[in-house]
Amino acid sequence: MNQLLKIKKTVALDNGSSCRVLGYLGSGGQGEVYHADWQGMDVALKWYYPQQATPEQHNALKYLIKIGPPNGNFLFPLAVASSDEITGFGYIMPLRPKNYKNISDLIKRRIELSFKQLLTATVELTDSFLQLHAKGLCYRDISFGNFFIEPDTGGILICDNDNVTINGDKTTGVIGTPRFMAPEIVRREANPDNDSDLFSLAVLLFYLLFLHHPLEGKREADIKCFDLPAMNKLYGFDPLFIFDGNDNSNYPVQGYQDNALIYWAIYPHFIKQLFIQSFTKGLNNIHGRVRGSEWRQQLLRLKDSIIECACGAENFLDETQLQQAGQLQPCWSCQQRLQLPPRLAIKHPTQQMVVVLNRDTQLYPYHLYTNRKNELTAAVAQVVQHPQKPNVWGLKNLSPDTWTFAENGQIKSVVQGQSVSLSAGITLNFGQTQAEICA
Amino acid sequence: MIIKKRPGGELATRPLHFIWIADCSYSMQGEKIEQLNFAIKNVIPEMQKVAAENVNAEVLVRAVKFSDGAQWHVAQPTKVDDFEWQNLSVNGMTDMGAALHLVADQLKMPPMSERGLPPVLVLISDGQPTDDFTSGLNALIQLPWGKKAVRVGIAIGDDADTEVMEQFIGNKELPVLQARNSEELTKYIRWVSTAVLQAASAPPSQVNDATRSNVPLPAVPTVAPISSADVW
């Protein structure tokens, strides 16, 4: 049902080559997207509706092609496309592989991700936008529709990058997607920039982790017809976080907004604090918004806090709750009280990281070395089962560095490929950091 | 069945009622009614796709037909995935007012639920009302859900009463969609059942322009200049 380009049509590219339209993929607010062949390579070709094919958009594309993507997660424009016979223009970008799914599949639970996979996706997203911001750019339109997820790995791909501009640029018209726009944008008091991106990112993270919108509580439930004036009020002129500690008038309505209540009960204190900051202080004060680096660090911490219950369900270690109650909460799935698994307390110069050791836990360079970027690159250690003694679990050294630990007055070494048993009280020396095994 | 790895359900949705209001008078006889049948049937898969990707709405579709009086063609609010289009056939006059009364009866609370998204009402006609159109329209727009509904008018051919259509639409930002050939009809049917449907529930990326509508209306599809051979 395409209307802009005909199948088999060839369009010229500004890099001197051309591409051929193979099929129609879909349409959005700005144009239509086609599957195309570019020199034997499958690419996506977006063609703008006439009213969107502005000189500003053309210049923006040229700029983006010149600077290239911030990292490999962005499906950035590769070349501008045009045709003598068709008005307007378009651009080609890498084609999304089929194993990357729409976020609607995740939100509607047609694909089911574990917390580990989901948190990997949130870290990748946060890291990608952080890198985009670090380049002096802003995305302007963070929402569900603009990225895809690989369910097995938690990998993500970010599309619709044609709205990306230099931070603060006022030339392009896109101001965001309702439900994700920062209040000051909804009220048309400001132009999108990296501060409004941070608000949209917090909404997106809340949606992914809670399957609910952070501002949709009683006030939303009280609205009969949820149209644009209602949205503007709820997200722009009268926003209130559903878990605002000082004002509970927008608390979620049981039986209607259950996801928010269910997830609020199971996430640890430290991550909820970031959402509280984002949607109370950060709601109307751009300086109060949680920075991307903070999100990335704390989302990794949340991933390190996963406790696998005996029933197989993933829960979280909440140290604040543990200290207060003296025991862990019941598992959300089987309702049995959770048992505390072995943990690794890793001492860094400025902080201590606690990693819960489940049967498949992996450690990354930022765990064992100081001043490493918080990212999920190749693992340097992994929890493994003893090949002959299934009850014995160990930590396998996957790094080229030798670890040491003291036992019965002797210093023992763990070289690459060897494992050390998870015995309580042992202090492992990773070189730059030391870690105690707690059981 | 998918085994749940995380607690809770899917994101909460609100119902979105989408109602076709189709002219089945004698003047629609022949290719017009067949092209309308074809266009709606053809767009169902795309409408289903848009609904599947829409996380905020539960799309429910119905249809009213009018000629001598008006009847529900599809009376039950039907999930878009289960929606099937039975071909319309023509018969009698153009009782558009009766059709609007029928829709108004269903937009009262109850049967409408307390919470919802703006309904989308699509009036398709090639002629002039032969009954009391104004009474039907008044019955509709005096209801809160009728007032909030996105009302779209598709005029088939040159004889449709566009003034009446404009009154039905009641929004200067949204023109009557003039379908002068089957291609244009298909284009407008597609636009209303995908882009408008999306805008009424989960509006896509917005540009900075002021709208007075209660739904951010997507740009009306452009139609290419037609040659005389295309005119009905």
Image: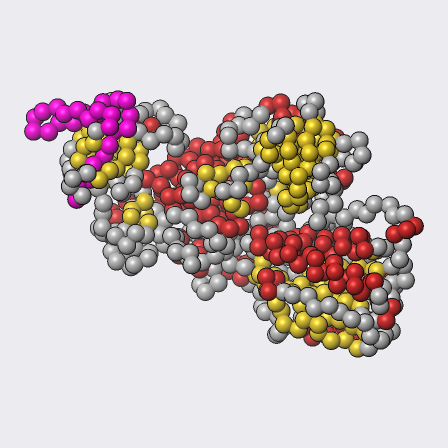
Q: Residue, x 31% and y 36% (percent of image)?
A: A362
Residue A18 image position (x, y, % from top left): 69, 28
Q: Residue, x 25% and y 52% (percent of image)?
A: A310
Q: How many labels does the image show?
A: 0
Residue A107 image position (x, y, % from top left): 49, 52
Q: Residue, x 26% and y 42% (percent of image)?
A: A359
Residue A408 located within the stretch drawn in magenta: yes
In this rendering, does residue A208 appear at all? yes
The answer to which of A399 and A356 lies nearer the viewer is A399
Q: In this view, does A265 lie above or below A99?
A: below
Q: Quadrant of residue A408?
A: top left
Residue B106 image position (x, y, % from top left): 67, 73
Q: Residue, x 39% and y 48% (percent of image)?
A: A114
In this rendering, does residue B140 appear at all? no
The answer to which of A339 and B22 lies nearer the viewer is B22
Q: In which quarter of the image is residue B64?
A: bottom right
Image quadrant containing the C terminus of chain A? top left
Residue A291 image position (x, y, % from top left): 47, 35
Residue A156 located within the stretch drawn in magenta: no
Coloring applied to the structure? secondary structure
What is the residue that sits farthest to the bottom in this orientation? B69
Residue A379 shown left or right of residue A160 in the figure: left
Residue A313 shown left or right of residue B174 in the figure: left
The answer to which of B90 and B69 lies nearer the viewer is B90
What is the residue that sits farthest to the right in this orientation? B228
Q: In which quarter of the image is residue A422?
A: top left
The answer to which of A33 and A143 lies nearer the viewer is A33
| Bounds of the magenta segment | A391-417
Q: Is residue A191 above or below residue B192?
A: above
